[in-house]
Every structure is written in C-alpha cells, then in structure tokens.
Image (tube, helix red, strand yellow):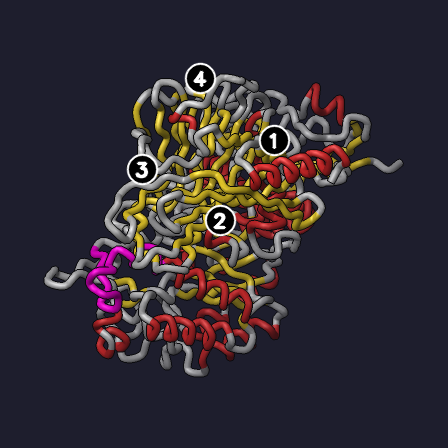
Amino acid sequence: MSSKATASWIATLLAALSCAAAPSGPITLRTATFELNLQPGADGRLYQREVGAAASSKDARRNEEFYPQAGDGYVFEPALQVTHADGNTSTTLLFTGATHTNEAPDIGLTRVNLRDPAYPFEVSLCFRTYHDRDVIEQWQEIHHQESRPVILERMASTSLLLPSTNTYLRHFFGDWTNEMQPVTEQLAPGMKVLDSKLGVRAGQFRNPSFILSLDGPPNETDGRVLAGSLKWSGSFQCAFDHDGQRVRALAGVNPFASAYFLKPNETFTTPVMIWVWSANGLGEMSRKFHDWARQFGIRDGNKIRSVLLNNWEATGFNFDFNRIASLFDPAKQIGAELFLLDDGWFGNKFPRTNDSAGLGDWQPNRHRLPNGLASLASEAGKRNLQFGIWLEPEMVNPKSELFENHPDWVIRQPKRDLELQRHQLVLDLTRPKVQDFEWSVIHDTLGTPGIAYAKWDCNRYLTQPGSSWLPSNRQSHLWIDYVRALYALMDKTARAFPHTELMLCSSGGGRADYGALKYFHEFWPSDNTDPVRRVIMQWDYSYFFPSMAIAGHVTHWGNRPMHFACSVAMSVRFGMDLDLTKLSAEDKAICAGAITAYKHIRDVTQLGDLYRLEDPHLEPRGALNFVARDRARAVLFVFQLKDAPAQPVLPRGLDPATRYIVRELNPAPGGPALPQEGKTFTGTELMRDGVVPSCAGALEACVVEFTANSN
Ligand code: GLA
C-alpha cells in the first residue's frame, strides 16, 4: 500500500473511532481511484454522497440514506425491510461506530455498525476494499436478540446512490443458446428491475452482472463506469430506483417469496456484491475485474488451463468403452491434453441412453463401461491424456432408481402435477439426506482413480418451489437455503479435490456468476458454439470474466470454416468437441495448428490484460488483443463477420518503446500473407498505424503475435 493510501486508511480509522464515540464522520472507503463517502447525519442515520459527486455541505435528505429501511419515513425502494418479533414492520438504523482492519497490504475490511434504538437489532455494513484494483466487495451482516425470530422481507447486499442525469445501464438478458445479450439504456425516473425467480440455474434469462456508466453511454476508453456483479447463484434482484434526483442501485437476494425467519442470536449474511470502478471506460474496468478475478474470484487463477477434447457434440449419448477409447489416440495426436466424457455414462436399471432416464443413478452403465470409469481414465492416462467426467448431481429423472426409492426427495408442490423440464426434477438440497447423497455421488465419482476434471451441469430451474423437508411455515427459506447448501457442497468438493479442475455448466451459461465460480475454474458460457455467435457472446462475457474462465469449444455448430471456429475458440479457454476421425485432412491440420499456436500463446491470453478493440455488435469484425503483464508479448485476434475492405486494426496496451516482431499464427491455408509478417515495429508504431489483418472476407480470422525483439 502506498504511504498515501496508508495515511488515508489511518484517517478513515481515526474518523471511524471518533464516530464510535459520537456519531460524526465522514467514513471514506477509498481505493486507488474510487471513493465512497458515508456520513452519519445529525439524526444518527447514515447518509451517502452520490458516487462521483463533488463534496457538498448541504444537509443530507432522506432519499440520500445509504442503506434505507422500510417503515419509518423512507418511501422509496428500501434496502432493508423487516418484521420485528412483536409485529412492528418498521426499522430505524442509527450509526453506532465503525472499525477497519487491514487484511493484506492493499486489502482492507471496514465494518460500519448500525442499530435500531427500539430493538436489539443490528446491521453491520461490510466492505472489503481491494485498493490497487479499484474493487469493493459489499455485504451486510444482520443480527438480533429479539424474543422470537424476525422476518427479513428484503435485505439488499448493496444500495448505492448514483447521479440521475446521464446515467446509463448495460445489462444482459438471454435464454438457452442465446445467453448474455447486452442492452444499454439511459436510466429514467421509475424503477428498472432485473431479476430472476428461477432459484436454481438462476441466470438463464438474465445475468446478475451489469454496468453503470455515469457519463453517457459507456465506451472502452473514456468515462466513469462501475461494474456490478452479485455473487449469488440463486434468485436475485437488481433494481435501479430513479426518483428524479438520483439513482439508487440495489442488488441482492430476490425478495420474491423469500421471507427469511432469522432466529435470535443468528447472523444472516447477505451475498456479496462486487463493484469495480474505472474512470477510463470499460476496458480498464474489465482489466481490473479480470485481475481481481484471477486472484480472488476463481480457483487457481494463476494456473494455465489445458486443451480439452469433449465427446458431447461428437457422440451425444451414443457410445461405449471402445467408442470413447477410440477417440483418445486422435485426441493425443492432435495435441489435446484432457479428455472430457460427457453425459450418458451411468444408469443400469434405467440406462442413460437419452435425456429421459437415469439421472440420479450414478453407477457406470455395465454394458457401456463394463470395467467402470477407472478403466477409461486409465486408457486415457496411458496416452498421457488427463480424463474428466460430466456430472449433474442436483437432478433426478423420474425414470430412475433414485426417484423410485425417494420420491419425496424432489422439489415439488403438493397437490400439483409434477412439472418436468428436460424430463427431470431438482433434488431438495435443504434435506440433509439429499446433501449426503449428492456428496457421496461427487465423492465417489471424482474419487475414481484418474479423474482430473469434472463438468458440473444443471439442466433445469425451479417452477414448483415446494420442499417436503422444510416446515410448512418456512417454505420461503427454500430459495436461500438451497443455494447455501449448494455452496457448502461445492466448497466441500473444492476442498476434497484440490487438484481436480471444475467446469460450471447450466445448459450453458445459467450459472455464470462469481458466487459459484469461487469453487470452479471456468464456466460453459453457452451450448451455442456457433463461432459467429461466440465472437459476440465472448465479447459480452469478457466485461466481467477473464478469458481463462470462459470455455470455448470448436464444434460444427453453424457449419463455419474450421479456421474461423478455431480462431474464435482460441481467444478463450480452448477446447474441441469434434469427432476428429471424421475431419478432412485440411481441417485436421487447421485444428492441430490451432492447438500448437494456442499452447504457445495461452500464457498471454489466459494471464494477460485484455483490450477490446472493435466491437462486433457495431463493426463488420470483432477485434481484441491480450498483452502479457511484462508487455514483452501480445496477441491480436481479428474475427471478420461480414465482408469489408481490409483496414488496419490498432492494438492497445503495448509498450510504446519496445520493438515487436509481427507474426501471424496458424494462418488460414491458401490465404494471403500478413503484409507486416516477420517485420519489426515499435509499440508506438503498431498502436498508431495498426496491422492490416490477412482477413477481409466474412468468416475469416487472423491471430497475430507481437514478440519483443531482443536483438
Ligand atoms: C447440457 C450441457 C451440454 C451437455 C448436455 C449433456 O445441455 O450444457 O454441454 O453437457 O447437457 O446432457
């Protein structure tokens, strides 16, 4: 931490300590270029100066309260709504003090304590600041000592005031195979609500991440932007309440049907909200976010990811031991490092030969895999290929032994016809026996000798949210308790299998959130692997997620040219989902070339800084480049979506003085050579004059490496 930063923290601490004695302030949460200013008012409540606003001495108004409570004067969208033990539906929170501790040289934890003067009811507003990365994590801890449970009707993880003029919101909607579609709109008076009521696989229609831009529509290089991302894989609500004077951004567990009865002396900890600030547009925002994510957001964020070959698109459910084993040699020959066996390996009384049966019966199918999974893993191991396995531990098909034996283990509503999705139901993870069962499935499967990787799928959401385990007057706990039990299971998995890599999948991107990613290495963004769609989708995911966490596989979706498909997948965590034995010699050579090239550049793409250059939503091509942290190497990707005259593309983030050699990697067969191929330019020249890529026709692509010339 710089001495300036240390001084600011000491000031904050002193201010906080003086606040503890007599409410005064201010409390400033400060990171490298961001400040959040809180101020206890004369009335004892806690107020916030809007983000980005200049200091003002005017008296705080009620709609400037930082974490407003329902029922005692506040009439807009509250952050907290509680029914106390005696039935009182109002809460008043007054400032009682604050503490600050340094957790690491640039990481601080500040707790601002509030208390209701009429009830033994307290809320600690918690902030973890990552100074150098301009990231603040925020959550609340709610605690009481009333005589009976209090009902938490809503309990936002964050409630931030922003200016009302010229504030834009970018959010992301979608559906299966069409995830993460951006919408950018100016916030206007009224409430804008983005939410999920799906409970499980909650992000299917909307991602719990968004961008607020304070200076008009956001762009890559200018303007103040704030990324928000809720670490929660259950139903969520993000609300933007524009009251004509300012915008309040609220995010947290969705209050919909989720009243939570908090017992005396228990603490309710809300999910964590991540805020990432940049005063220089979206590019810097993402680089800070990615840097944070690799350190704190995902598992093993400093470890290079393997090249994976998946059998799903190649075989679907139609395979046996020999068929899978026959894919190993071609996988190894082409350069893959990890083989992932997808759905269809289990179930005996009800074999999993299609998606209508077998889920829940996680014993390897005796006909398909007579010697179990270990023998397949060992075949792969003989070729020095790692082996991974697909699992969907939370689900059951009615056609399964599990359902026959435990029909009461599923989430359903009594007196209603069972509603299936993909022929399946969700197991009730609030029930301890289900927790034990799912753990045993994970433990036994991942504990099989030779399993190095797992894809954890989740192919439906809740539509009939009833639990036969929870008491009838606690049904509303299902939404929260399910996610908590899920996280406990994921946590146990990550701890028990510290060397097993985990992919988070939910029919694609239904769980692309940092709540679950904490236990995983990567996520599957979409079942849609058409590279045309992926160029755009990967662009949009990249606002929040580093490329190493985004899995991209080459498939035949869309029947695009192989070189284009490979180049697009190479810009994220690269894999293939192809029957290599059926590829033409030319396509096979392109794939092999792409894998070799990828292995050469993946330290840069996975660990380096991302610069988004040309937006494929707006331009005939998408372009982006990654720069190694020491700026000695960089990789440029250009994806041509429509025919257009070859124009130079201007990389960013290079070291101006360094002289770089330009080299195209795995060029398309028969294509024109890059005009700058093999030549040397300074970073300044490259960033000013650009590189004319070898692609101009639709569905052509170009991957270019810049390497510092040490001569
Ligand atoms: C989901 C996943 C796919 C595949 C299938 C298997 O749809 O998203 O990648 O694993 O399940 O059934």
Pair 4/1: label in front: 4
Q: SS for tag 3?
A: loop
Asked if the magenta segment contains residue 217, the reply would be no
Examine the structure image and report whether residue 466 is included in the region drawn in magenta: yes
Vertical relation: 452 (above or below) 580: below
The span picked out in magenta is: 464-482
The disc, 2 or 3, on the residue closer to the chain's N-terminal end is 3
Q: Residue at x 81, y 30 (%)?
A: 659
Residue shown at 68% from the left, 48% from the top:
603
Mark 4 and mark 2: Cα distance apart in space: 29 Å
Is 676 on the left-hand or right-hand side of 97? right
Query: Of the residues shown, which amino acid type is indicated by label 2?
Result: Tyr
Front: mark 2 or 3: 3
Quadrant in the picture for the N terminus: top right
Q: Secondary structure at mark 1?
A: helix
Q: Which residue is mark 3?
A: 70
Which label's residue is closer to the chain start, 4 or 2?
A: 4
**Amino acid type, label 1:** Glu
Q: Which residue is mark 4?
A: 166
- Residue at 66 percent across and 33 percent down: it is 32
